[in-house]
Image: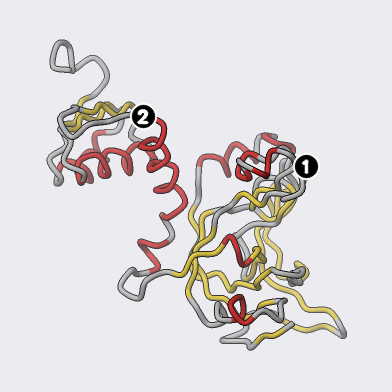
Amino acid sequence: MHAFIVGKCYRVVGQLRYMRAVVLKNNEIAFTTEYPLPEPSAGEALVKVSLAGICNTDLELTKGYMGFSGVLGHEFVGTVIGVNSSNKKENDFIGKRVVGEINIPCMVCETCRNMPRHCPSRKVLGISQKDGAFADYLTMPVSNLHVVPDEVPDEDAVFTEPLAACLEVLEQLKITPSNSVAVIGDGKVGLLMAQLMADLGHKTSLIGKHEDRFLIVEELGVETYLPGQMNEKV
């Protein structure tokens, strides 16, 4: 593995290296300082996590969703400190700040020929068969990583994955500039979607249950309503 370590936060015991991690096992969460440091497989990068976001999916996993056991977390930004590859282009990621696509396809099945994100055998970071981002380090295929522009701070970059989910809607629906948009729900994705629609110039309304969150989008001109308040306004 070609690597250098920046501000390492793992400890070495004999021949083993350990890191901090939040681990889910049998639907119970535990924090440990003795989780084995992951070793990147061929074509994978070792990423030092800077920030990780908590998603409602993480909460559902603790209730048994997907039957997942391992390190939680799929929203992250971090720095590549090593790459298990002799490919120069892949090694150019070393030292770069990155975010990642969470679906890891097998790349050998029929589905992967055209729709690798929908691979039935795919691993999903922190959700299915792949340890996630609630740890000091994680591993990801280099092909899943995207370099974060210098002008984008970690606090914004960590929202890349949920923002990508919002952008997927624009690929699934035909929304013209003249369309008004109503977003139902004021959770994280709902708030992001409302901000995105407003930023794209759509007249946007948000229906939610938490008035304390409305200010986040009202500053962008989004009209906000509690359930039952809209009547004939939409």
Q: Give the total number of marks visible in the rendering.
A: 2
Q: Amino acid at mark 1?
A: Asn
Residue at the image position 73 percent from the left and 53 percent from the top: 70
Place of residue 22 in the rendered image (x, y in percent of width and height, measured from the top left): 65, 58
Residue 117 occupies which quadrant of the picture?
A: top right
* Helix, strand or loop at mark 1: loop
- Which quadrant of the view contains residue 227? top left
Left or right: residue 231 versus residue 123 is: left
Looking at the image, which residue is at 70% across and 85% down?
2
Q: Which mark is residue 173?
A: 2
Work out whether residue 34 can be spotted. Answer: no
Could you say which is closer to the camera, residue 208 or residue 75?
75
Question: Which residue was labeled with disc 1?
Answer: 26
Residue found at x 64% / y 70%: 137
Kindly indicate whether the residue at mark 1 contacts the one at mark 2 (C-beta within 8 angstroms). Answer: no
Residue 233 versus residue 192 in the image, above or below: above
- Spatial CA span between label 2 and label 1: 39 Å
Indicate the amino acid at tag 2.
Leu
Q: Split into 4 quadrants, where in the image is the C terminus? A: top left
Dot 2: element: loop
